[in-house]
Amino acid sequence: MIRRLSQARERGIPEATVARLPLYLRALNGMAERGLATVSSEDLATAAGVNSAKLRKDLSHLGSYGTRGVGYDVEYLVYQISRELGLTQDWAVAIVGVGNLGRALANYGGFVSRGFRVAALLDADPDVVGDHIAGLNVEHIDELEAVIKRRGVSIVVLATPAAAAQQVADRVIAVGVTSILNFAPVVLTVPEGVDIRKVDLSIELQILAFHEQRKTDRMTGGPAMAEEWPEAVDL
Protein backbone atom coordinates (compact mmCIF):
# COMPACT_ATOMS: atom_id res chain seq x y z
CA MET A 1 0.00 0.00 0.00
CA ILE A 2 2.69 2.49 0.97
CA ARG A 3 4.49 2.07 -2.35
CA ARG A 4 1.24 2.87 -4.07
CA LEU A 5 0.88 5.97 -1.89
CA SER A 6 4.34 7.05 -3.02
CA GLN A 7 3.12 6.78 -6.61
CA ALA A 8 0.11 8.91 -5.73
CA ARG A 9 2.37 11.61 -4.36
CA GLU A 10 4.52 11.47 -7.48
CA ARG A 11 1.38 12.05 -9.56
CA GLY A 12 0.66 15.24 -7.63
CA ILE A 13 -1.84 14.03 -5.03
CA PRO A 14 -1.04 15.96 -1.82
CA GLU A 15 0.16 14.03 1.20
CA ALA A 16 -2.75 15.34 3.29
CA THR A 17 -5.22 14.07 0.70
CA VAL A 18 -3.59 10.64 0.65
CA ALA A 19 -3.89 10.49 4.45
CA ARG A 20 -7.63 11.20 4.26
CA LEU A 21 -8.47 8.66 1.56
CA PRO A 22 -8.69 5.75 4.04
CA LEU A 23 -11.21 7.80 6.08
CA TYR A 24 -13.41 8.22 3.01
CA LEU A 25 -13.06 4.56 2.13
CA ARG A 26 -14.10 3.43 5.61
CA ALA A 27 -17.16 5.66 5.51
CA LEU A 28 -18.07 4.49 2.00
CA ASN A 29 -17.74 0.83 2.92
CA GLY A 30 -20.17 1.39 5.77
CA MET A 31 -22.62 3.02 3.39
CA ALA A 32 -22.26 0.20 0.89
CA GLU A 33 -23.03 -2.31 3.63
CA ARG A 34 -26.23 -0.38 4.38
CA GLY A 35 -27.23 -0.56 0.72
CA LEU A 36 -26.74 3.11 -0.17
CA ALA A 37 -26.14 3.64 -3.88
CA THR A 38 -25.24 7.34 -3.82
CA VAL A 39 -24.03 9.82 -1.22
CA SER A 40 -23.78 13.61 -1.18
CA SER A 41 -20.47 15.29 -0.47
CA GLU A 42 -21.97 16.74 2.71
CA ASP A 43 -23.04 13.36 4.07
CA LEU A 44 -19.76 11.68 3.12
CA ALA A 45 -17.76 14.52 4.66
CA THR A 46 -19.74 14.26 7.90
CA ALA A 47 -19.22 10.49 8.05
CA ALA A 48 -15.46 10.94 7.46
CA GLY A 49 -15.10 13.84 9.89
CA VAL A 50 -13.97 16.51 7.39
CA ASN A 51 -15.65 19.50 5.78
CA SER A 52 -17.36 19.04 2.42
CA ALA A 53 -15.17 21.55 0.54
CA LYS A 54 -12.04 19.66 1.56
CA LEU A 55 -13.62 16.35 0.56
CA ARG A 56 -14.63 17.62 -2.89
CA LYS A 57 -11.11 18.94 -3.47
CA ASP A 58 -9.57 15.65 -2.33
CA LEU A 59 -11.77 13.57 -4.60
CA SER A 60 -11.09 15.87 -7.54
CA HIS A 61 -7.47 14.66 -7.42
CA LEU A 62 -8.87 11.23 -8.28
CA GLY A 63 -10.86 12.66 -11.16
CA SER A 64 -14.13 12.15 -9.28
CA TYR A 65 -16.45 15.16 -9.16
CA GLY A 66 -19.83 13.60 -8.44
CA THR A 67 -23.08 14.57 -10.12
CA ARG A 68 -24.94 17.73 -9.19
CA GLY A 69 -28.13 16.90 -7.36
CA VAL A 70 -27.17 13.23 -7.06
CA GLY A 71 -23.78 13.08 -5.39
CA TYR A 72 -21.22 10.31 -5.70
CA ASP A 73 -21.79 6.73 -6.77
CA VAL A 74 -20.79 4.79 -3.64
CA GLU A 75 -19.66 1.60 -5.36
CA TYR A 76 -17.59 3.40 -7.99
CA LEU A 77 -15.99 5.71 -5.44
CA VAL A 78 -15.03 2.70 -3.32
CA TYR A 79 -13.33 1.26 -6.40
CA GLN A 80 -11.58 4.52 -7.25
CA ILE A 81 -10.15 5.03 -3.77
CA SER A 82 -9.25 1.35 -3.37
CA ARG A 83 -7.38 1.45 -6.66
CA GLU A 84 -5.54 4.63 -5.68
CA LEU A 85 -4.52 3.14 -2.33
CA GLY A 86 -3.35 -0.05 -3.99
CA LEU A 87 -6.01 -2.17 -2.31
CA THR A 88 -7.13 -3.92 -5.47
CA GLN A 89 -4.22 -6.34 -5.08
CA ASP A 90 -2.98 -8.60 -2.30
CA TRP A 91 -0.21 -7.23 -0.03
CA ALA A 92 1.80 -9.71 2.02
CA VAL A 93 2.64 -8.45 5.51
CA ALA A 94 5.17 -9.76 8.04
CA ILE A 95 4.78 -9.00 11.74
CA VAL A 96 8.05 -8.92 13.65
CA GLY A 97 7.61 -9.18 17.40
CA VAL A 98 4.88 -11.53 18.60
CA GLY A 99 4.19 -10.25 22.09
CA ASN A 100 0.73 -9.14 23.18
CA LEU A 101 0.53 -6.44 20.50
CA GLY A 102 1.91 -8.66 17.74
CA ARG A 103 -0.56 -11.40 18.61
CA ALA A 104 -3.45 -8.97 18.59
CA LEU A 105 -2.41 -7.70 15.17
CA ALA A 106 -2.02 -11.24 13.84
CA ASN A 107 -5.53 -12.11 14.98
CA TYR A 108 -7.14 -8.95 13.59
CA GLY A 109 -9.69 -10.06 11.04
CA GLY A 110 -9.94 -6.78 9.16
CA PHE A 111 -6.68 -7.05 7.22
CA VAL A 112 -7.90 -9.45 4.54
CA SER A 113 -10.98 -7.41 3.64
CA ARG A 114 -8.76 -4.37 3.17
CA GLY A 115 -6.24 -5.96 0.84
CA PHE A 116 -3.64 -7.18 3.34
CA ARG A 117 -2.57 -10.72 4.16
CA VAL A 118 -0.44 -11.56 7.18
CA ALA A 119 2.08 -13.91 5.59
CA ALA A 120 4.65 -14.30 8.37
CA LEU A 121 5.16 -13.94 12.12
CA LEU A 122 8.68 -13.70 13.53
CA ASP A 123 10.15 -13.40 17.01
CA ALA A 124 13.47 -13.86 18.83
CA ASP A 125 12.06 -15.53 21.94
CA PRO A 126 12.57 -19.33 21.78
CA ASP A 127 9.48 -19.75 24.01
CA VAL A 128 7.39 -18.01 21.33
CA VAL A 129 8.96 -19.47 18.19
CA GLY A 130 6.88 -22.39 16.99
CA ASP A 131 3.62 -21.10 18.45
CA HIS A 132 0.63 -21.39 16.12
CA ILE A 133 -1.20 -18.07 15.81
CA ALA A 134 -3.94 -17.14 13.35
CA GLY A 135 -3.04 -20.06 11.10
CA LEU A 136 0.70 -19.30 11.05
CA ASN A 137 3.70 -20.72 12.87
CA VAL A 138 5.93 -18.13 14.54
CA GLU A 139 9.37 -18.32 12.92
CA HIS A 140 12.71 -17.32 14.38
CA ILE A 141 14.03 -13.86 13.64
CA ASP A 142 17.21 -15.45 12.25
CA GLU A 143 15.06 -16.51 9.27
CA LEU A 144 13.85 -12.95 8.62
CA GLU A 145 15.49 -12.32 5.25
CA ALA A 146 14.67 -15.77 3.89
CA VAL A 147 11.04 -15.52 5.02
CA ILE A 148 10.58 -12.10 3.43
CA LYS A 149 11.88 -13.37 0.10
CA ARG A 150 10.02 -16.68 0.23
CA ARG A 151 6.65 -15.15 1.16
CA GLY A 152 6.92 -12.09 -1.09
CA VAL A 153 6.52 -9.70 1.83
CA SER A 154 5.97 -6.07 0.82
CA ILE A 155 5.20 -4.49 4.21
CA VAL A 156 6.78 -5.20 7.59
CA VAL A 157 5.07 -4.37 10.88
CA LEU A 158 7.49 -3.78 13.77
CA ALA A 159 6.03 -4.70 17.16
CA THR A 160 9.43 -5.27 18.76
CA PRO A 161 10.95 -3.69 21.87
CA ALA A 162 12.48 -0.28 21.16
CA ALA A 163 16.04 -1.57 21.49
CA ALA A 164 15.58 -4.08 18.67
CA ALA A 165 13.57 -1.97 16.21
CA GLN A 166 16.41 -0.20 14.37
CA GLN A 167 18.36 -3.40 13.78
CA VAL A 168 15.29 -5.18 12.44
CA ALA A 169 14.45 -2.19 10.24
CA ASP A 170 17.98 -2.21 8.82
CA ARG A 171 17.68 -5.90 8.01
CA VAL A 172 14.34 -5.70 6.24
CA ILE A 173 15.45 -2.64 4.27
CA ALA A 174 18.62 -4.45 3.21
CA VAL A 175 16.52 -7.26 1.73
CA GLY A 176 14.38 -4.85 -0.26
CA VAL A 177 11.41 -3.89 1.94
CA THR A 178 10.62 -0.18 1.62
CA SER A 179 7.37 0.01 3.62
CA ILE A 180 7.39 -0.26 7.43
CA LEU A 181 4.66 0.22 10.02
CA ASN A 182 6.42 0.92 13.31
CA PHE A 183 4.75 0.30 16.67
CA ALA A 184 8.04 0.36 18.58
CA PRO A 185 8.45 3.48 20.79
CA VAL A 186 11.49 4.76 18.92
CA VAL A 187 12.22 6.97 15.91
CA LEU A 188 13.86 4.94 13.17
CA THR A 189 16.59 6.19 10.84
CA VAL A 190 16.02 4.97 7.28
CA PRO A 191 17.39 5.85 3.84
CA GLU A 192 15.51 7.91 1.30
CA GLY A 193 12.86 5.94 -0.51
CA VAL A 194 11.75 3.98 2.56
CA ASP A 195 8.29 4.86 3.86
CA ILE A 196 7.62 4.55 7.57
CA ARG A 197 4.33 5.05 9.38
CA LYS A 198 4.73 5.30 13.15
CA VAL A 199 1.98 4.35 15.57
CA ASP A 200 2.70 5.54 19.12
CA LEU A 201 -0.20 4.77 21.45
CA SER A 202 1.35 6.66 24.37
CA ILE A 203 1.53 9.86 22.32
CA GLU A 204 -2.10 9.50 21.27
CA LEU A 205 -3.11 9.01 24.90
CA GLN A 206 -1.11 12.07 25.93
CA ILE A 207 -2.90 14.16 23.31
CA LEU A 208 -6.25 12.92 24.61
CA ALA A 209 -5.13 13.72 28.16
CA PHE A 210 -4.32 17.27 27.04
CA HIS A 211 -7.82 17.75 25.65
CA GLU A 212 -9.40 16.23 28.75
CA GLN A 213 -7.38 18.61 30.93
CA ARG A 214 -8.44 21.61 28.83
CA LYS A 215 -12.11 20.59 29.17
CA THR A 216 -11.69 20.20 32.92
CA ASP A 217 -9.99 23.58 33.18
CA ARG A 218 -12.80 25.28 31.29
CA MET A 219 -15.38 23.78 33.65
CA THR A 220 -13.45 24.55 36.85
CA GLY A 221 -11.96 27.88 35.84
CA GLY A 222 -8.29 26.99 36.16
CA PRO A 223 -5.39 26.80 35.75
CA ALA A 224 -4.96 30.09 33.90
CA MET A 225 -3.27 30.09 30.51
CA ALA A 226 -0.09 32.13 30.05
CA GLU A 227 -1.95 34.88 28.21
CA GLU A 228 -4.28 35.23 31.21
CA TRP A 229 -1.48 35.79 33.74
CA PRO A 230 -1.32 39.29 35.26
CA GLU A 231 1.51 41.56 34.17
CA ALA A 232 4.61 41.43 36.34
CA VAL A 233 4.59 43.89 39.21
CA ASP A 234 7.82 45.54 40.32
CA LEU A 235 8.32 45.19 44.05
Image (cartoon, rainbow, N blue to C red):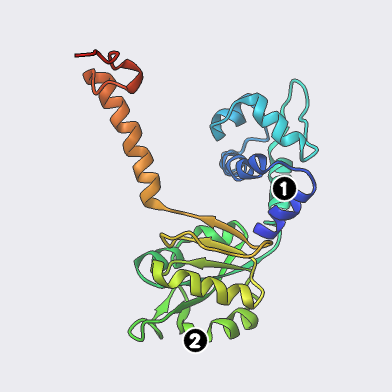
Categorize mark 2 by other alpha carbons within 10 Å: few (<14), some (14-19), many (20+). Answer: few
Res 35 → quadrant: top right
Q: Horizontal and vertical percent for residue 136?
A: 48, 78
Residue 109: image location, x then y, percent: 48, 61
Instruction: Depth check: give the residue in front, 229 or 216.
Output: 229
How many numbered marks appear? Answer: 2
Q: The C terminus appears in which quarter of the rendering?
A: top left
Residue at 21 percent across and 20 percent down: it is 220
* Residue 115 makes an appearance in the image: yes
Badge number at residue 161: none
Question: Which residue position holds label 2?
Answer: 142
Residue 1 seen anywhere in this rendered image of the structure: no
- Horizontal placement of 124 versus 220: left or right? right
Residue furthest toward the front? 235
Report how far apart the C-alphas of labels 1 and 2 lie in the structure. Answer: 39 Å
The tag earlier along the polypeptide, 1 or 2, is 1
Q: Residue type at mark 2?
A: Asp
**In the image, what residue occupies the spot 58% across and 82% down?**
145
Q: Is residue 169 above or below residue 123?
A: above
Identify which residue, 195 or 226, lies in the foreground: 226
Quarter containing the N terminus: bottom right
Q: Secondary structure at mark 1?
A: helix
Q: Which mark is residue 79?
A: 1
Quick check: 5 left or right of 224?
right
Q: Name which residue type carries label 1.
A: Tyr
User: Left of 231 or right of it: where is 1?
Assistant: right
